[in-house]
Image (spheres, rainbow, N blue to C red):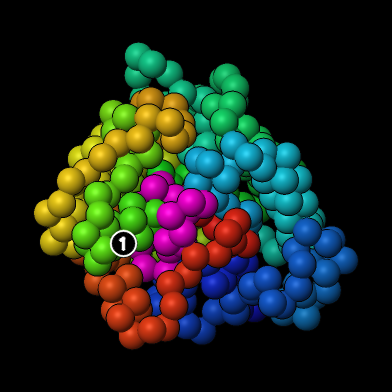
Amino acid sequence: MTGPLLVTGGTGLLGSAIRKIRPDAIFLSRADGDLRDRSVAQRLLEDIRPGQILHLAGLVGGVKANAANNSRFFEDNALINTAVLSAARSLEIQRLVAIISSCAFPLFSDRATTEDDLQAALPYDGNAGYGYAKRMLDLHTRLVAKEEAWKWTTLTPVTLYGPQDSFDPESGHVVGSLISRCWAAKTTGTPLVVWGSGRAVRQFVFVDDVAKIAVDAVQRNLDSTTTIIAPDAGITIQTLAETIASVMGYAGPIVFDPTQPEGVLVKRLRSMTFSERFPDCRFTSLRSGLEATVRWFIDHSLAGKGIPSRSLPLCHQS
């Protein structure tokens, strides 16, 4: 089937990065219609008649937002995913890549989680709503790919960060919220407060890297099993905070607040297939990615253009 590339969640973090690579694509956002409504999703896809879909749309948020809204994260994401994939199937769109999340995976204390573990155990309870919705998205994609013999698959990036992120200090993911808090600490002469003990381990991937991989994947003949995108084994949140402070030129105190949530202590994924499927990929270093993100944040802050701080934004991220 011929037709344009359609990107759902087109104004979110990943959608904005893909726009730089594929400005010719059609980008759907919440302003175009509520994708939780199957009739709206069907109408939009019928009007566009895409040949390929990158499905990024979803309700996302940080650790506190997930814990406080588990049912909403499940309901909204399950509705969006079912509506988009059902419409794509009815129109016989044979190439689709959906973005799932590391939150869909179980975690193990003695080893990294791999693609084979997706259905092996329960996801972390603190974001179970979001995790189960993403797990269902992966299952839906694989079932259609098997029954129709189409090139539908999913990608699982670890925590995304970069320009256009949500920098809300309360509901954003950890990189964006720490950048926002560090900027506030630097400009007001107050301590940088980091949620939790600082000992939690997380993995991060620069959004531009995932954008390139996603655009490549939708044109490839990949099988339906998901591909984890994890550049390295991860770092502690303390190291992340110290690196952000260094990049931003903040030399004040860093204070850890154990009364605030930090999620599971160690979250580590490892791909068994990435290097085979994407052998030419070269990841941006964390330092370089943070420099680009902080530069974007400061430029937009100083220019008075406003920083994206959407509470529970309808876009992808994980």
Residue at the image point whose x is 46% and y is 59% from the top: 168
User: Is residue 200 part of the magenta span, yes or no?
Assistant: no
Left or right: 181 with respect to 222?
left
User: Is residue 168 part of the magenta span, yes or no?
Assistant: yes
The secondary structure that dominates the magenta segment is loop
Q: Nearer the viewer, residue 67 or 50?
A: 67
Q: Is residue 199 above or below residue 137?
A: above
Left or right: 25 with respect to 32?
left
Is residue 271 something that shows in the picture?
A: no
The image position of residue 21, as x and y in percent, is: 40, 76
- Callout 1: few (<14), some (14-19), or many (20+) C-alpha neighbours within 10 Å? some
The image position of residue 2, as x and y in percent, is: 65, 76
The image position of residue 228, as x and y in percent, is: 42, 41
Q: Is residue 3 above or below residue 272?
A: below
Is residue 171 something that shows in the picture?
A: yes
Q: Nearer the viewer, residue 145 or 188?
A: 188
Quarter of the picture containing the N terminus is: bottom right
Q: Is residue 121 above or below residue 86?
A: above
Residue at the image point whose x is 77% and y is 51% from the top: 79
Q: Nearer the viewer, residue 127 or 93?
A: 127
- Element at label 1: helix
Residue at the image point whose x is 34% and y is 76% from the top: 301
Res 147 → quadrant: top right
Q: Nearer the viewer, residue 267 or 303?
A: 303
Residue type (three-letter) at the residue carrying disc 1: Ala
Res 146 → quadrant: top right
Region rendered in magenta:
159-175
The image position of residue 310, as x and y in percent, is: 55, 64
- Residue for badge 1: 184
Left or right: 263 with respect to 285?
right
Left or right: 70 with respect to 86?
left
